[in-house]
Structures are given as structure tokens and as C-alpha cells.
């Protein structure tokens, strides 16, 4: 568990290859001083990623549209996205919807087939019992097994792509801190157990805490020295993996 201080473009390339990269860069959607898009990091991240790895990038639709060609140029292919829904949000405009969601989008190296990318499908244990009947197929398609099956209450079902999780307002050490549980879901999906996660815009180090919960190794990078120090202190205060009922 390491937090580097400095520019991820200079620091993170020396610590890979990463099984998975998380990136929560400034979105560049506002005129706030700290909200400036960072140029040139995507191709560096791609080179630092294992061929079987993938990258999850946080952003708004506006930020992804503004940078779409950079993902192409860096050699990334789109895989999927999740929507993080929070209990409250930001009101930049009085004449628009109150914004209570953010996106996290997964990309992988364009030359690698999706079937080779590490992907542990996440499920929830809340299926409702039902009987599923398969349509009859024409005889020439051959034997297709039982014509129906019955699932059980409380069984696994695919996790939904909209995740409702309260944000960290009131207890956050960073103004745009992401919930650990959200990051943990992405990490469990895309990094093998014991694998290395690179967090290129670490902020509070929340992803480091998620890695501890999920038993993955972690290297984060934060350009603001004071924030990097807070993140380091946060990670230093965590229990070892398995010592909190997390194993
Ligand atoms: C959106 S915040 C990340 C928040 C983080 N995910 C969390 O949960 O706390 C983006 C962070 O990236 C940092 N940053 C901006 N440019 C950077 C760069 N070139 N290298 C490393 N960190 C950078 C900012 O200081 C800021 O803390």
C-alpha cells in the first residue's frame, strides 16, 4: 500500500505493470482552479497496463465526450459503464436537473480480445424465485438441455449497472472522495486477488482502503502533497486484510 507524491504521468509508469488501473481525474467541467483536465496520461496508463488488465475512469458524460478521441488515440476500447447514484449532488445550474450521479467507464487495450481481459462477474444474492421456460428451438439446432429451470429466492443475479451508494459528505477528507464500497466493487470485478491496482489520481486514498478490503495490492499517486499525506495516514490506520471480518 503506497501513495506516491507527484504527477502520475511521471511517477506511475515506473511501478507497473498494473492488473487494473483506476483513474478519477479532474473532470474539467467547471472553472474551478483545481478542475483542469490533465493531458497525456491515457497513453502512459495504457502502456503501464497488463495486456489482460483494464482501466476504470470516473467522469461525467461531458468529460468523456470532450476526451473521447484521446481514448481512441491511446489505444483503448470501450467495455461498459456503471452509474454511481448518490443521495445528494451538485447544483451548478439552477435551470437543469439536480445532478446526483457520476459515471465510471471501463476500457481495455484495443488489441486484446475482451474474453482475455480479467473479469470476475459480480452478483448480488437477491434473485426472486421464478421458473424460466426456454423457447422451443427447431430440431436441427440439436439438444439444448432442459426446456425450463427454476431459480431460488435469494440466489445470485448479475449486479445492476446503477449502484446507489451514499457519498462521503461530512466525513470525507477530499471534496470529491468516492465511496470505498463502490471502488471495491470495481476492483473485485477487474483485478485478480493479490493483483496490483494503480490509482493515478488518488485523492484521499479511498481506493487503497478498497484494495485492503479486497486483498489487492495498491499504488496511488497524488499531486497535492498535503492530500497525499492525509491519504498515507488513512492507509496507515487500516487493519490488515482479514482483521475486520473482511476475509
Ligand atoms: C477527483 S480527485 C480524486 C478523488 C479520489 N478518487 C478519492 O476518492 O478521494 C482528483 C485528484 O487528482 C489529483 N491530481 C490532479 N492532477 C494530478 C496529476 N497530474 N497527478 C496526480 N494527481 C493529480 C488532484 O489533486 C485530486 O486530488
Image (cartoon, grey):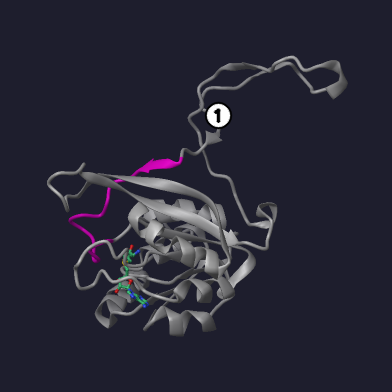
For residue 219, say whether it is visible: no
On whether residue 25 falls in the magenta region, the answer is no
Residue span colored magenta = 161-176
Residue 217 in picture, x, y percent from top left: 52, 69
For residue 244, say whether it is visible: yes
Q: Disc 1 marks which residue? A: 155
User: Along the horizontal axis of the image, is 9 left or right of 16?
Assistant: left
Residue 132 in picture, x, y percent from top left: 62, 18
Number of other residues with Cα within 10 Å of mark 1, as a class: few under 14, some 14 to 19, many 20 or more: few
Instruction: Using the image, determine if residue 23 lies above or below residue 94.
Output: below
**Residue shown at the point (58%, 67%) measured from the top left:** 75
Q: Quadrant of residue 164?
A: top left
**Residue shown at the point (52%, 74%) measured from the top left:** 43
Residue 140 in picture, x, y percent from top left: 87, 20
Along the viewing direction, whichever of 82 and 38 lies nearer the viewer: 38
Q: Quadrant of residue 1?
A: bottom left
Numbered disc total: 1
Q: Does ligand 1 reach within 8 Å of label 1's beta carbon?
A: no
Instruction: Using the image, determine if residue 80 lies above or below residue 173.
Output: above
Q: Quadrant of ligand 1?
A: bottom left
Instruction: Using the image, determine if residue 166 lies above or below residue 184.
Output: above
Along the viewing direction, whichever of 58 and 235 lies nearer the viewer: 58
**Residue shown at the point (46%, 64%) measured from the top left:** 22
Instruction: Using the image, determine if residue 129 lies above or below residue 225.
Output: above
The single residue placed furthest to the left in the displayed view is 94
Secondary structure found at label 1 = loop
User: Along the horizontal axis of the image, is 141 left or right of 159?
Assistant: right
- Secondary structure mostly taken by the magenta-highlighted segment of the chain: loop
**Residue shown at the point (62%, 69%) measured from the top left:** 50
Residue 165 in picture, x, y percent from top left: 33, 45
Amino acid at each position: 500500500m503506497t501513495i506516491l507524491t507527484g504527477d502520475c504521468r511521471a511517477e506511475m509508469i515506473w511501478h507497473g505493470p498494473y492488473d487494473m488501473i483506476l483513474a478519477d481525474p479532474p473532470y474539467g467541467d467547471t472553472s474551478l482552479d483545481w478542475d483542469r483536465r490533465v493531458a497525456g496520461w491515457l497513453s502512459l496508463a495504457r502502456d503501464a497496463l497488463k495486456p489482460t488488465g483494464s482501466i476504470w475512469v470516473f467522469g461525467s458524460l461531458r468529460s468523456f465526450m470532450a476526451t473521447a478521441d484521446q481514448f481512441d488515440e491511446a489505444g483503448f476500447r470501450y467495455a461498459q459503464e456503471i452509474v454511481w447514484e448518490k443521495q445528494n449532488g451538485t447544483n451548478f445550474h439552477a435551470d437543469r436537473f439536480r445532478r446526483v450521479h457520476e459515471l465510471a467507464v471501463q476500457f481495455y487495450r484495443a488489441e486484446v480480445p475482451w474474453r482475455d481481459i480479467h473479469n470476475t462477474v459480480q452478483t448480488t444474492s437477491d434473485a426472486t424465485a421464478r421458473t424460466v421456460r426456454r423457447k422451443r428451438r427447431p430440431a436441427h439446432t440439436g439438444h439444448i438441455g432442459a426446456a425450463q429451470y427454476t431459480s431460488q429466492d435469494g440466489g445470485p443475479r448479475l449486479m445492476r449497472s446503477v449502484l446507489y451508494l451514499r457519498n462521503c459528505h461530512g466525513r470525507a477528507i477530499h471534496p470529491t472522495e468516492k465511496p470505498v464500497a463502490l471502488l471495491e466493487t470495481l476492483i473485485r470485478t477487474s483485478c485478480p486477488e493479490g493483483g496490483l491496482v494503480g490509482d493515478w489520481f488518488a485523492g484521499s486514498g479511498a481506493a487503497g482502503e478498497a484494495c485492503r478490503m479486497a486483498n489487492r495490492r495498491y499504488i496511488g499517486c497524488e499531486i497535492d502533497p498535503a492530500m497525499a499525506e492525509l491519504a498515507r495516514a488513512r492507509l496507515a490506520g487500516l487493519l490488515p486484510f482479514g482483521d475486520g471480518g473482511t476475509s
